[in-house]
Image (cartoon, helix red, strand yellow):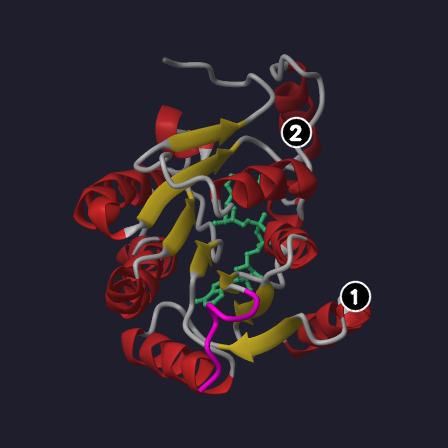
């Protein structure tokens, strides 16, 4: 087993081949981390494109398949990472899905599918790294929430509930791990220029942009910057916090 503390810190990024996840992987690698991008094995075309896209990183970014909604599979993934690369020092939970529809039309499947990925997935991954991080006295966990978890959004009772839950989970875990060198924070993106938001009808997207004080959609780079900041070696006094990255779309204190 490689010792991750003697070399580069090992960072596991779920949803790692997605719009925001890919950028997080690259920026963490730029910061000297050994990165494992985790995503669904079924996305074979996208996995190939991702591998090509990050090939210049010469092995500093690797892909590992895992369905984060499967507790056992997450355990197997972390074991594999520990055996082949080293203990996970950094965990970014960016895997996420939407199943938008008003509550009047939402069927239990749309509710449960979303919860299994967006909320259970965070538990499944954190549960398998927390012992090792606290024992070794270092860890950085960043969970991707959303502005829509803070404000609620029409057609997103499932998504808003899960994303609000992600921050509640993060605050609770932050308390459990604070004395062991492990920080747990959330980053709440506003609307970003990614496939998830490209799926929103054009007229609604224009309305959203006109409501953003900065006057544009966010970029994956805007989000990755916040994640890299929270995972720095000297970010140990920031824990249980939510860092909104939304162009001023929602401000609170
Ligand atoms: N794009 C936005 O505007 C926006 C805004 C707020 C929050 N977010 C959150 O940021 C995160 C990243 O979003 P994105 O825009 O990159 O979305 P994306 O759809 O581009 O990426 C999400 C990734 O998660 C993966 N995924 C889905 N189910 C999975 C599972 N069961 N196991 C493993 N991987 C799985 C997908 O394959 C995909 O690659 C998500 O949690 C999302 O909810 C995004």
Q: Is residue 149 magenta?
A: no
Left or right: residue 141 compared with residue 214: left
Q: Which picture quadrant has residue 190? A: top right
Left or right: residue 26 compared with residue 229: right
| Label 1 with label 2: CB-CB less than 8 Å | no
Left or right: residue 101 compared with residue 52: left
Q: Is residue 4 magenta?
A: yes
Q: Which one is in front, 182 or 63? A: 182
Quick one: SS at disc 1? helix
In the figure, 149 relative to 86: above or below? above
Question: Which label's residue is closer to the chain start, 1 or 2?
Answer: 1
Q: Which one is in front, 199 or 221? A: 221
Where are the magenta residues, as a range?
1-8
**Mark 1 or mark 2: which is in front?**
1
Q: Which one is in front, 189 or 106? A: 189
Q: Which one is in front, 129 or 161? A: 129
Percent position (x, y) of residue 163? Answer: 36, 41
Residue 128 visible in the picture: yes
Left or right: residue 116 compared with residue 50: left
Percent position (x, y) of residue 182? Answer: 32, 51
Separation (CA) of disc 1 from disc 2: 28 Å
Pointer 1: what residue? 53
Pointer 2: what residue? 205
Pointer 2: residues within 10 angstroms few (<14), some, or many (20+)? some
For image coordinates 63% across by 12% down, the residue present is 213
Quadrant in which the N terminus appears? bottom left
Pointer 1: residues within 10 angstroms few (<14), some, or many (20+)? few
For image coordinates 53% across by 43% down, the residue present is 227
């Amino acid at each position: 087993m490689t010792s991750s503390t003697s070399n580069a810190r090992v960072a596991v990024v779920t949803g790692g081949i997605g719009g925001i996840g890919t950028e997080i992987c690259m920026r963490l690698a730029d910061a000297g981390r050994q990165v494992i991008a985790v995503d669904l094995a079924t996305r074979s075309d996208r996995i190939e494109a991702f591998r090509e896209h990050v090939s210049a990183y010469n092995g500093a970014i690797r892909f590992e398949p895992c369905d984060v909604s499967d507790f056992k599979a997450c355990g197997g993934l972390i074991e594999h990472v520990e055996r082949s690369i080293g203990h996970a020092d950094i965990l970014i939970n960016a895997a996420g899905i939407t199943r938008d529809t008003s509550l009047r039309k939402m069927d239990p499947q749309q509710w449960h599918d979303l919860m299994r990925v967006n909320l259970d997935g965070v538990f499944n991954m954190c549960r398998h790294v927390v012992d090792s991080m606290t024992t070794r006295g270092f860890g950085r966990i960043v969970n991707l929430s959303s502005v829509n978890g803070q404000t609620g959004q029409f057609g997103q009772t499932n998504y808003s509930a899960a994303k609000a839950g992600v921050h509640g989970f993060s605050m609770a875990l932050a308390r459990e791990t604070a004395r062991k060198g492990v920080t747990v924070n959330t980053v709440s993106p506003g609307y970003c220029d990614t496939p998830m938001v490209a799926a929103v009808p054009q007229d609604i997207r224009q309305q959203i942009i006109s409501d953003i004080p900065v006057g544009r959609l966010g970029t994956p780079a805007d989000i990755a910057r916040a994640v890299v900041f929270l995972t720095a070696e000297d970010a140990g006094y920031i824990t249980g916090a939510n860092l909104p990255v939304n162009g001023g779309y929602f401000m609170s204190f």
